[in-house]
Image: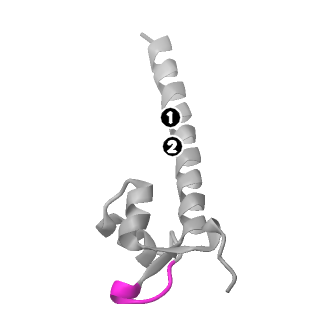
Amino acid sequence: MKMKSCDERDVSLAVAATLLDVSVAFLSQLLDTGELASHGEGDGRRVRVSDVVSYKERRSADNRRDLATALAVAQQAWAFD
């Protein structure tokens, strides 16, 4: 039997939510809107570890970009004081 690599493994919603530091309810919303892929239904719904990691990286990049934008706006506002 061939072992799956860590990135190919599937995890439960509870584990995926813990990895993302979000609630299972919020994770379910991400899955329902297609922001994050899943398979299975109901209690058997699973998420691929590689998809969780990719989402987390995207979210981190978005957060860094949003922070840079907020700092630029604040600096412009301070220039007019």
* Pick the front one: 42 or 73: 42
Q: Which mark is residue 8?
A: none
Label 2 sits on a secondary structure element that is: helix
Q: CA distance from mark 1 to mark 2?
A: 6 Å
Q: Quadrant of the C terminus?
A: top left
Q: Quadrant of residue 51?
A: bottom right
The reply to whether callout 1 and callout 2 are in contact (CB within 8 Å) is yes
Q: Quadrant of the N terminus?
A: bottom right
Label 1 sits on a secondary structure element that is: helix
Which residue is at 46% across, 79% downward?
46
Colour scheme of the picture: one colour
Q: Find residue 76 and report its horizontal and vertical position in percent.
A: 51, 20
Query: Which residue extends farthest top?
Result: 81
Q: Find residue 38 and report its horizontal and vertical position in percent.
A: 50, 79
Residue under pointer 2: 63
Query: Magenta segment, which residues?
Result: 38-44
Q: Is residue 46 above or below residue 74?
A: below
Q: Is residue 80 above or below residue 69?
A: above
Which residue is at 53% across, 63% downward?
52
